Image (tube, grey):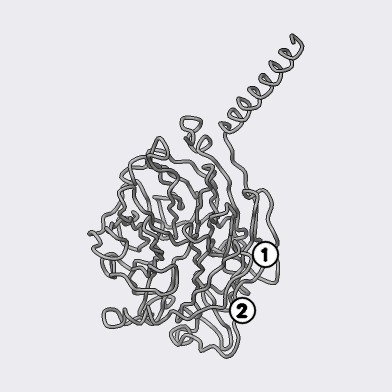
Amino acid sequence: MNQLRRIIVCVVLVQTLFVVGGAAASEKAVMNKTDLFEAGTGGYATYRIPGIIVTSRGTLLAYCEARKSLQGDWGTIDIMMRRSADGARTWLKQRKIVNIEGKVTQNAVALKQNLAREGEITINNPVAIADRQIDAVHFLYCVEYARCYYMRSDDDGRTFTEPVDITRTFEKFRDEYDWKVLATGPGHGIQLKNGRLLVPVWLSTGTGGHAHRPSCVSVVYSDDHGKTWLRGQIVVANPNPVNPSETAAVQLADGRVMFNIRHESKPRLRGVSISGDGATGWSEMIYHEQLPEPVCMASIVRLSEKPGHKRNRILFANPHNADDRGRRNVTVKLSYDEGESWPVARSIELGISGYSDMAVGEDGMAYCFYERGSVDTSHYRPAQLTVARFNLQWLTNGQDRFE
């Protein structure tokens, strides 16, 4: 009997040490980086416009534009994706997920400004949404900045349905804004607590620089898991602020939706507007003093929310550069008060770095998929698309942990 008791005590001690040791391990700071796409490989001159989501099954999907040349946003561009089922530790090879068949009419505004050549087809602005209600992945993309398509995956991003043209949703903006250029996201869309799928969009008349200006921003949304799509109200439009475009969205703890807006106005600060339902009744845009804007895509994502966690937390990332428009120093910031203030900030990439998108796993691990480096010192043309995997302990220097 004494021997049996000793065995039981030993087992309990081992189990206790295992649990304590596991907790201690989870409290350690984590930060590591993996390059997913590299310029000059796979038949593409560069890779740009990163997007990332965590699916309902915990799988990471990282996607981007694969550009055949360095000429810019117009030209031959494909959509690539990589998949990780183990929290960004390993990744499957890249694969093209959009295939264009038949003749495609090129966007006239790009040809008029000599931004593209005859026969070069642009597939642009990929946006994914993880649907946790029906265990699906929704995916939107544009062709020639002129048409928008929707497809869906029911097998965790392994395959997608045939694309459906949903440009008619954007046609409903015509009476209010006669666009010639449309774009979704980029980055990721969000699913609201009531199940609504929400995708930020921007529109342009295509008469200004790069055929992307002047512009306005709005949303498209679906209340039936992607079967049909509707347009939202225009949030802001040029000239107030000047050329608003790529926008990031997050749902606040009280159910409202916050828009974080790129623009070209002064002050060089991100714009913020809030809606009760993510589609209508947008508040007057304000400039956020703690969020410098070098005119670049940014990303925003919820990390935690009460009562499931002790604190509300939102993450934001963009090039933190208040001095000029240089794209460098991609930095992650943390808010504990639903985006009112951002008291915590830590740089992910001090050097050249620009567009980014973020996702968060159920365990609180965060992922920032971002552009870094350059293949051309005279222009911003990223050398790599990289995933930074980090936790709250790293971000806060051990002052906070995910609970």
Judge whether 264 appears above or below 54 on screen. below
Number of residues whose C-alpha sits closer than 10 Å to that of mark 2, classed few (under 14), some (14–19) or many (20 or more): few
Q: In 3D space, how far apart are the residues under numbered discs 1 and 2 (Cα atoms)?
A: 15 Å
Task: Check disc 2 and report its element: helix, strand or loop.
Answer: loop
Secondary structure category for the residue under label 1: loop
Residue at the image point whose x is 59% and y is 89% from the top: 102
Frontmost residue, 22 versus 119 = 22
Residue 125 screen position, x and y as percent: 49, 70
- Is 167 displayed left or right of 33 in the figure? left
Q: Left of 103 or right of it: where is 332?
A: left
Closer to the camera in the image, 46 or 336: 336
Say which label, 1 or 2, has the lower sequence index.
Answer: 1
Q: Do residues under tags 1 and 2 come within 8 Å of each other at their CB atoms?
A: no
- Percent across and percent down for residue 1 are 74, 10
Q: Which residue is mark 1?
A: 94
Q: Residue at x 61, y 74 (%)?
A: 69
Q: At label 1, which amino acid type do we have?
A: Gln
Which residue lies under the disc numbered 2? 99
The spot of residue 341 in percent (x, y) is: 33, 42
Residue 117 is marked as: none
